[in-house]
Structures are given as structure tokens and as C-alpha cells.
Image (tube, rainbow, N blue to C red):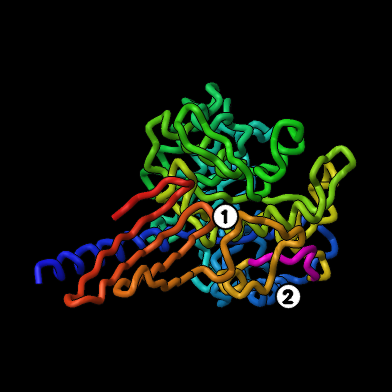
Amino acid sequence: MASYGVFIFHFLLSAILFSSIVDATGLIGVNYGRVANNLPSPDKVVELLKTQGIDRVKLYDTDAEVLTALANSSISVVVALPNELLSSTAADQSFADNWVQGNILKYYPTTNVEAIAVGNEVFVDPNNTMMSLVPAMKNVYNSLAKYNLDSAIKISSPIALNDLQSSDPPSCGSFKSELIEPVVKPMLDFLRQTGSYLMVNAYPFFAYSANSDTISLDYALFRNNSGAVDSGNGLKYYSLLEAQLDAVFTAMSALNYNDVKMVVTETGWPSMGDENEIGAVKENAAAYNGNLVRRVLTGSGTPLRPQDPLNVYLYALFNENEKPGPASGRNYGLFYANEKKVYSIPLTQSELQSGEATPVSGGNQSQAPASRVRVSVSLCDANTLEVVVSFPFNCFSGVEIRLKLTLSEEFSWRWHVRFWFYGMFLYI
């Protein structure tokens, strides 16, 4: 009876650990930019999001037509206060109050606004709005608090990887010294105090395109590769994005903000670019976004923060024909303006499990298997039966339960559970 109790105890403990890892899978959303003159109406866009199973969207403004179209859609929305309003919002609480009344309260809760991005990549804004950022964030937060929405709607601001002094290797991640005291620490203080998270825009494409002679394309696209060991922390990385994100985590940790969470508010890969934009082709875009979705929906966090799920907003929903700059900027979309797919990738758990949509490039060995649970039964000898249940979260991590039953004069069993993560095993 005692052994039976021990068995139950270990089984329940393993189930708790197992469920906690499964629950650590992340969320996928998409950025809905509108720098174009040929996009479908917001009503049609909402229908497109629904048919594709996309239930999280990030905007770059608070356009009335878009927010109205999103009403009663069950789609979670991140809205934005643009950089050009930062100075006014920071200088005048009543300006912030009026903005919240006209752009949030007018639509919430019918439109499910879950966060406000105050500015975007403000630290590299050529208009030098940096010193207005945190005061603006505080004033918007105070406005929400007046209507008891400060817990329901988070306040943050997306940063760019350019805000780091160093990002390679990840263990050397640090913010630019001139940013730390004026804005980084005050912003992270605010995020900690309000229970919010850091928004990060990260594009492995830029790093690969500029350094294709030293960065493996497979490493950039989440494909099977030999990985890269960070000698500073001993961790092994199999994707460039995770290395970039851990550089940000390291930079925050160096300032004693280990407890602040992160959301990737922009990442993507262009399907077309100028001649000098190495890697900007449709096959690579399909591989990056498709394998990233698999990684997010079937995996845990980064090597440095495995317990924190990866929550990611893909950039972008549409190709936007009026975006200035290189051709790549107009070709990040998952869809053309006519709502046709640029390439086919899975966007939901159901698509992953059914295998209905796969990256154009194929051949990726680092994605989660379409059939996740594997069960094998074998006879070790005439009296011993072994059952193995394997549940891979992705090709880098998973859980295996092994039960050995002896069917002789006395019935007995032995069993163990092991978790694997990037080649390391934890036995229970």
C-alpha cells in the first residue's frame, strides 16, 4: 500500500510539472499596419482574421473605423499612441485624459483593448521624443486608473534591438549607457510597478542580411542546425531570435529587472526585397514565420527564460505598398491586399496538429511533429511489458513517461519520467 501511495505521489507531481510546461506555450498575434492605398475595408479584415483563427492583433493607432470593426469580435487588441503625441501627453494630464476618453473608453469593452503601446521605438525616434516617453506612459496610466481600467489594460512601449549596446553573445547583452539612467530604468520601474511587460521589436532578418557570411541561414530560420554555445552562460542556442531576446533579458537582468516579462511586438521576414537585401525571398519568409509559429505554439520560453512563454506578434498582416524605404519594407505581409496568402503557414494549434498548412520551403527538422503524442509497447521478456509515452513540445524539448510492468507471480512495476530540454535530461 505504501508503494502504491508513493506511486500516486510521483504521478501527481509529474502531472503538475508536465501541465506547467504545456501551459508555458505562447500566443501568436499579428500586426495590422495600414500604410497602403489598396487594403480591404476594416470589416473585411476582421472577417479575414476570424477565418484564419487569428485572435490577437496589434495596431499602430486608434483608427475609429478599425476599432469599430473589431467590436464584438473576441479579438484582443493592442492599440497605439503615436510618437507625435508623446510630448503633449507627457506635458498635460488633461490631454492624456481626453485621449483615453476619445480613443479607449469610446470603444472598450465592446472592442477588447488589452494594451496600449505608448510610442514605438522611441529611443531611435529622429524627432527626439525620448524624454517624454515615461511621463506620457504615466499620464495614460493615470487616466486609465480614473476609470478603474489600470489593471485591465496594460501600458508599455516597444523598443528596438538597436537600443542595446551589445547583443552578441546573449550573455553580454546590455543597454546603451546613455539610455539607462534617463529612460530605461524609469521605464522598467514603471513596468514593474504596474505589472506590465516590455515590448520588443526583433528582426533576425536584419542581422542575417548584413552578416550572411557569418550567420547560418538555418540558424536564422529556426531550421535544424548545430546550434551556438554562449560561453558566457553555457547555454546553447538554436535560433537567432531566441539569442536576440535573451540579450534583452540579460540587459534587464544587469539592471536588476529580472522579474519584468517580455512580449515580442514585431518580428517577421520579408518575402521580397531589393537586390542587396540578402535573404529576402518568399521561401525564407515562409520558413521563418512558419517555424516561429510552431516554436511559439509548441515550445516553452528562451534558453535563459524557459519558464516564460514566447508571446509574439508577427509583422505583418498585409504587404503595404506605400511604406517608404527599401522594397523589403513593403513585403512583410502574410497576405496580399486582395486577401490571398503570400505563402501558406500554420497560424493556430489546430493547423499545426492537422498539418493543413506548411511552410513553402519544407524540409525543416526543428518544427514540432504533426502527431505529438507517441506511444510504444514492447515485450522485454516473457513476463515484462514496457510502455513508453513520448510527448515532444518541439524538437528541442519534451517529456517521456516510461512504465515497466512485470507480470509474474507477483505484479510489480517500475516507472520514471524524464524531461528533455536542448539535449539535457531531468529524471523524476
Relative placement, left or right, of 73 versus 197 is right
Secondary structure at numbered mark 1: strand
Question: What segment carries the magenta color?
Answer: 340-346
Q: Position of residue 286 (x, y in %)?
A: 73, 58
Up the image or down, 304 lies above or below 162; here it is below
Mark 1: amino acid: Val
Q: Say which of 108 and 120 sits in front.
A: 120
Q: Which residue is located at x 54 percent, y 46 percent? A: 199
Q: Which mark is residue 312?
A: 1
Q: Say which of 49 and 14 sits in front.
A: 14
- What residue did someone put label 2 on? 44
Q: Main secondary structure of the magenta part?
A: loop
Relative placement, left or right, of 238 versus 290 is left
Of tags 2 and 1, which is closer to the observer? Answer: 1
In the image as oriented, which residue stretches furthest toward the front?
Answer: 382
Secondary structure at numbered mark 2: helix
In reply to whether residue 19 is colored magenta, the answer given is no
Q: Which residue is located at x 32 percent, y 52 percent? A: 427
Q: Which residue is located at x 80 percent, y 47 percent? A: 280
Q: Position of residue 278 (x, y in %)?
A: 81, 40
Mark 2: amino acid: Lys
